[in-house]
Image (cartoon, rainbow, N blue to C red):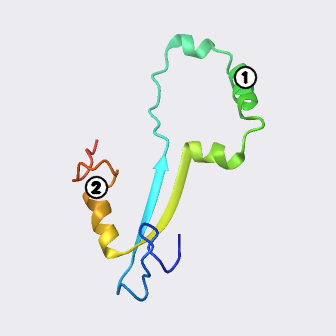
């Protein structure tokens, strides 16, 4: 990443290609606010927070952060850019993925 070669195919971007592209991949956890019911207001939130903190103890901080959000950057040559645009998820089906 962030080099002078294509991160997908390894082609030298300064010698073999006039232009290079930057791909920024961002994956974030989706959050849908829950509907709060009267019973929810009676839950022991302190106990739930303690349980959550215990479940995170001993785990790697980067791993925990990346469960919520991860960002990567890649250098691409023009052919790899075209290939990723044609099949961004690598499923071989071609075309853009369904957007919701």
* Residue shown at 27% from the left, 67% from the top: 82
Dividing the image into 4 quarters, which one contains the C terminus?
top left
Q: Is residue 33 left or right of residue 99?
A: right
Q: Residue at x 42, y 77 (%)?
A: 11
Q: Position of residue 15 (x, y in %)?
A: 41, 89
Q: Position of residue 55 (x, y in %)?
A: 71, 29
Count neighbours of disc 1 (C-alpha within 10 A) and say few if under 14, some if 14 to 19, many if 20 or more: few
Q: In this orientation, which residue lies closer to the viewer: 12 or 46? A: 12
Residue at point 65%, 45% (across, down): 63
In the displayed structure, would residue 79 be above or below residue 96? below
Check the image and report above or below for 45 versus 5.
Answer: above
Q: Which mark is residue 87?
A: 2
Q: Tell us which disc is closer to us: 2 or 1.
A: 2
Q: How many marks?
A: 2
Q: Which mark is residue 37?
A: none
Dot 2: within a 10 Å radius of its alpha carbon, few (fewer than 14), some, or many (20 or more) residues? some
Q: Which of these two is toward me, 85 or 91?
A: 91
Badge 2 vs badge 1, beta-carbon distance below 8 Å: no
Give the CA distance from mark 2 to mark 1: 46 Å
Give percent across and percent down for residue 30: 45, 39
Which of the marked residues, 2 or 1, is nearer the chain's N terminus? 1
Element at label 1: helix
Give the residue at mark 1. Answer: 46
């Amino acid at each position: 990443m962030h080099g002078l070669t294509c991160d997908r195919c390894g082609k030298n971007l300064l010698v073999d290609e006039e232009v290079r592209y930057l791909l920024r991949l961002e994956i974030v956890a989706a959050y849908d606010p829950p509907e709060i019911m009267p019973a929810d207001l009676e839950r022991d939130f302190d106990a739930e927070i303690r349980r959550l903190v215990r479940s995170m103890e001993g785990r790697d901080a980067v791993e925990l952060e990346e469960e919520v959000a991860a960002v990567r950057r890649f250098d691409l040559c023009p052919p790899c850019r075209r290939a990723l645009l044609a099949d961004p998820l690598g499923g071989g089906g071609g075309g853009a993925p369904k957007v919701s």
